[in-house]
Image: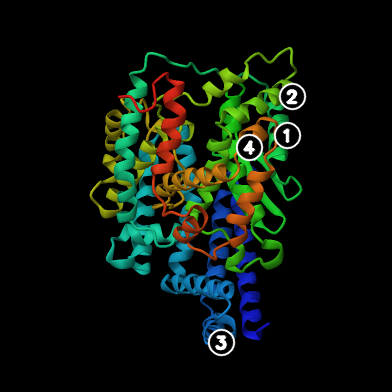
């Protein structure tokens, strides 16, 4: 192997190892850390962020990259060429950001996260507002340093950070028709005479814990290289080789919701576990392709598996086995209906598959307006509540269940939300392709056999790391560019019959 490339990868592994330590500290902050440790944690995180940055911009990286890029032996290998392309991208992006700004972003995120937790708990938007202003200001500076791709606006520079080459134009192009079709679907459902009711399943938290471990093991989440804990905001993090973590949240009367969260995070985590980190940690070929692909993996397990009739054939018996057959009443039909009830609500993470995307679109519009300076943060609650009224027809009773509900803005993640909906579109497109190639999948799922699904995702998606950009990966796997058609086919095909509406009728 080429000596310069070996040296370059060793340096990338060093930076990735520091990043994994930062991820571990972030996980700790959300799960275990005592509240008074927040102040020092911010200092620790900022130091790590600046050390990682220093390694990424080191002149040696520039020299090694130039040597590798000039080597025909290396660039003729398509996988190595992709690895170099992605290292170049990371190096250039790091070079555009001053070290002080990187440290400030990290430190501010740590403090703002704590301020947000308190503000949400006490319904005190004004207590959080200075931090939101600060995050917007820092993100404007960051976007200005990165520069907008293809003459787009500042927001595009932030989007590109989460999802390479994504622009607000592309997002709008996908959102506009999707929004219209979703509103039509939601309207038809609202007018349906047949209304399935949601069963709230009561299960002690200890029983739920056992159930989740059983489901995780069955779908292919490796509990020897992963673990599950509890946090207010469920998340997943791929820390490094042999270490992937997820969190969920339990409440006795929300067993179905909790299982949905766990399946979602497990989808993210199984992607991380499927990346070739053991062989090449630090190489972009062992890193996730971007947030859209990441989210496609979580949505596929949460919605296409976890909200399917076949899954509930198996899962109901699993609920019964773990809870005790005498105490567990609901049958598979009622559980299947319960996880698919469409009901406009206040909280994004609890939303059904159809109204969910209206929550995302609202955030996309409002965060762009705030970043541009068209919407002042003092006017955010009113703008939020107005939009919820217009889109979902409900009143927001307080900011904790309104504009304070999500963690993202406190962490400075502006430009993140659109990837949720794009990820759902990709999940539907992947599932449609997979199901066409595996016609017996429903029979298999009904018996608790999910091995083909994970095997297919491993081969088609996980094995490639960042080798292909999302558009290319989507075309290679599904034969088409990414759009919302498969998602709408999935939603109409499942939800209309549940509400007794004949498919195709008006
Ligand atoms: Zn997710």
Badge 2: how crowded within 10 Å, few (<14), some, or many (20+)?
A: some
Left or right for 176, reference 256: left
CA distance separating discs 3 and 2:
59 Å
Please report the residue visible at 33 percent of the width from the left and 54 percent of the height from the top. 170
Q: Are marks 2 and 1 in contact (CB under 8 Å)?
A: yes
Can residue 101 be seen here? The reply is yes
Badge 1: how crowded within 10 Å, few (<14), some, or many (20+)?
A: some
From this view, report whether residue 433 is shown above or below residue 17.
Answer: above
**Which of the two discs, 2 and 4, labels the residue nearer the N terminus?**
2
Image mark for residue 440: 4
From this view, report whether residue 191 is shown above or below residue 15.
Answer: above
Identify residue for label 3. 71
Q: Are marks 3 and 2 in contact (CB under 8 Å)?
A: no
**Which of the two discs, 3 and 1, labels the residue nearer the N terminus?**
3
Identify residue for label 1. 214
Quarter occupied by residue 258: top right
Mark 2 or 4: in front is 4
Q: Position of residue 265 (x, y in %)?
A: 59, 42
Mark 3 or 1: in front is 3
Mark 4 or 3: in front is 4
CA distance separating discs 4 and 1:
23 Å
């Amino acid at each position: 192997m080429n000596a310069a490339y070996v040296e370059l990868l060793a340096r990338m592994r060093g930076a990735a190892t520091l990043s994994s330590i930062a991820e571990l500290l972030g996980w700790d902050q959300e799960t275990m850390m005592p509240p008074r440790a927040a102040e020092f944690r911010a200092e620790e995180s900022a130091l790590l962020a600046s050390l990682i940055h220093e390694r990424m911009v080191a002149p040696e990286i520039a020299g090694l990259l130039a040597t590798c890029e000039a080597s025909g032996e290396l660039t003729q290998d398509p996988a190595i060429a992709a690895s170099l392309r992605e290292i170049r991208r990371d190096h250039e992006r790091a070079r555009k950001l001053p070290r002080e700004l990187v440290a400030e972003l990290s430190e501010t995120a740590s403090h703002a996260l704590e301020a947000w937790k308190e503000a949400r708990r006490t319904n005190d938007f004004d207590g959080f507002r200075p931090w939101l202003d600060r995050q917007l200001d820092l993100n404007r500076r960051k976007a200005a340093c990165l520069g907008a791709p293809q003459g787009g606006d500042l927001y595009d520079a932030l989007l590109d950070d989460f999802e390479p080459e994504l622009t607000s134009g592309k997002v709008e192009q996908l959102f506009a028709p999707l929004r219209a079709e979703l509103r039509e679907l939601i309207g038809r459902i609202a007018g349906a005479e047949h209304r399935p009711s949601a069963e709230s399943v009561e299960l002690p938290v200890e029983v739920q814990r056992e159930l989740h471990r059983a489901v995780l093991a069955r779908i292919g989440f490796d509990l020897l290289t992963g673990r599950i804990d509890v946090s207010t905001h469920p998340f997943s993090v791929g820390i490094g080789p042999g270490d992937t973590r997820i969190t969920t949240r339990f409440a006795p009367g929300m067993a179905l919701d909790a299982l949905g969260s766990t399946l979602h995070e497990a989808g993210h985590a199984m992607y991380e576990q499927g990346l070739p980190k053991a062989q090449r940690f630090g190489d972009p070929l062992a890193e996730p392709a971007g947030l859209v692909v990441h989210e496609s993996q979580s949505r596929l397990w949460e919605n296409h598996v976890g909200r399917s009739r076949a899954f509930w054939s198996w899962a109901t018996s699993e609920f019964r086995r773990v809870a005790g057959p005498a105490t567990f009443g609901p049958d598979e039909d009622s559980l299947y209906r319960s996880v698919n009830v469409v009901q406009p609500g206040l909280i994004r993470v609890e939303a059904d598959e159809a109204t969910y995307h209206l929550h995302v679109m609202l955030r996309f519009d409002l965060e762009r307006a705030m970043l541009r300076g068209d919407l002042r943060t003092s006017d955010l609650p009113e703008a939020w509540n107005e939009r919820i009224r217009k889109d979902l027809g409900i009143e927001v009773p307080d900011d904790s269940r309104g504009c304070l509900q999500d963690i993202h803005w406190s962490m400075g993640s502006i430009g993140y939300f659109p990837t949720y909906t794009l990820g759902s579109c990709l999940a539907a497109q992947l599932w449609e392709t997979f199901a066409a190639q595996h016609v017996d999948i429903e029979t298999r799922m009904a018996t608790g056999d999910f091995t083909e699904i994970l095997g297919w995702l491993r081969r088609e998606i996980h094995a490639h790391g960042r080798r292909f950009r999302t558009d290319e990966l989507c075309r290679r796997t599904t034969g088409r560019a990414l759009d919302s058609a498969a998602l709408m086919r999935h939603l109409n095909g499942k939800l209309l019959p549940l509400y007794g509406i004949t498919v195709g009728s008006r």
